[in-house]
Amino acid sequence: MTRMTQPVRTPAITRADRKTTDDLDGGLTVSPADPGKRLWHFFISMRTGLALMLGLAVLGFIGTLLVQADPGLQGDRQAYAVWLETVRPKYGGWTGVFDALGLFSVFSSIWFRGIVVLLTMSLLACSVNRAPRLWKRAVHPRTNMSETFFAHAPLRASIATAADPGTALAEVQTAFRARHFRTIVNHDGDTIHLYADRFRWGPFGTVIAHLSLTLILAGALIGTAWGFRNNSLAVPVGSRVEVGYGTGMSIEAKSFTDSYYTNGSPSDFASDLVLYMDGVQVIAQTVRVNEPLRAGDVTFYQSFYGAAAVMTVADPTGRVVFDRGVPLEWATSDDKYRVGQIILPDAGLTAYVVGATSGEVDPRIKPGQMQIEVYRSGLEGEPIATEIISQGQPANIAELDFTFVRERQFTGLIVARDPGAVFVWIGAGLLVSGISLVFLFPGRRAWARIQRRPNGSSIQVGAIVRHDVTFRPDFQHLVDDIELALTGSSPT
């Protein structure tokens, strides 16, 4: 018996015809009269997700364009006010506007957190909406397709053969299985329906990717809500500084060393630190840039260093109310002076210690001298007293005795606690897994319908292409294999 095949070419799919195939995996139909469903549709909409991601991108751009205040300044109104004055020459009259909108702390602003919450809800809604349909498609796929589908499928072919339906089915199954497709056969009278899929679990990579982004965003929210990060914890050598944030920790710098290459660039700088918990020493460690100190979920990183002024302050009774190094960690807008802060809560005063930047010559503040400016705490304006004092010579300023003892170094640390970091790491791993699953194992589906004809059988094959351009040539090769098997010769 001679087998004959006749491939039938069909016209390209039109816009109206797409409705037939697009409804195959149709989503939720929303009634305009149901507010709950409209809200659900809002969250699962791709436009919503894109708009929220665009909002995050805009805020991120603003956060990189504008100078951001150190997180450690946000709890100190006086220090933040001083910092705000340092950026006022750069932004002029816009400084107050940017500050009111929270644009100097974009990543902890209500705008950023609100968009993150909405985006997290959108991603969760998309995952919940998509997962049941993917599960049904993988476990209980639709096997029977109508004539309309095979007439309008994006990938389609029609083959007429003299072989009987049983033989044609065997050859079609063999062709699909040779390309590692799973096949499911369903007999409906004289019509044989065949469903084939490959990498049926691949589409779940999109759900995994959505959930991974949810974990990453949730980790970021947890970190900002219950964690902290201080990028400028300055600890003068020989002094102990409270870490704060309810940790009960304090850190002491025993010594600081720095070394440089022959071209002047730093090769290494290290701090010998002692960590105390509620006044009891718990850890002593030398900290370098890549060797942080970890105590539970709190981590200390070596970040920067500079000069400090060791100061003592005594009240009118002679009681010493302040005795430690003052890090000169801030710079004036012209970078000619370095500034440090002394907070005196019992007296209701804040004093600023001002020294000339290293290498700068100032006719007023000479080597071995510091300028003291005293303000009422919480109030801006002119200082109530200003005086330049020399090393080792006490001076009475605002009814307090200030003494500049000596100049020392300070070590600058980043101290952070991020309880959401574990979620971010897990989410990052899932994101890579999900993306790999989608791109390396793309889910593919195809259908075939075999019908008896007076002179043999007719075979119709159809498939849907969505975001998988490589399936088109593979589908053509699959049709060629079926033709070759049914004719015994290469197809034209």
Image (spheres, rainbow, N blue to C red):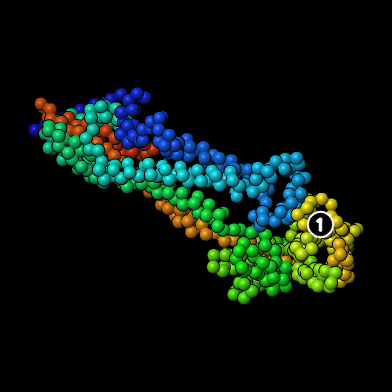
Q: Does residue 119 appear to the left or right of 360 in the view shown?
A: left
Residue at 65% from the left image edge and 45% from the top image edge = 102
Residue 321 x, y percent position in the rendering: 78, 69
* Residue 188 position in % (x across, y down): 14, 34
Between residues 440 and 326, which one lies in front from this camera angle? 326
Residue 491 lies in quadrant: top left
Residue 188 vs 71, above or below: the answer is above
Position in image of residue 452 (x %, y %): 12, 30
- Inspect this view and state whether residue 408 appears: no
Q: What residue type is labelled 1?
A: Tyr
Asked which quadrant contains residue 272, the reply is bottom right
Asked if residue 234 lies left or right of residue 407, the reply is left
Residue lying furthest left = 1
Query: Is 49 displayed left or right of 409 in the figure?
Result: left
Q: What element carries label 1?
A: strand
Q: At 28% across and 25% down in the image, what residue appears?
A: 10
Quarter in which the C terminus is drawn: top left
Q: Which residue does the image show at 78% across and 60% down from the upper left?
A: 348
* Residue 353 in the image, given as x and y percentages of width and height: 81, 61
Query: Which one is in front, 450 or 373?
Result: 373
In this rendering, the answer to whether 171 lies above or below 405 is above
State the residue position of label 1.
375
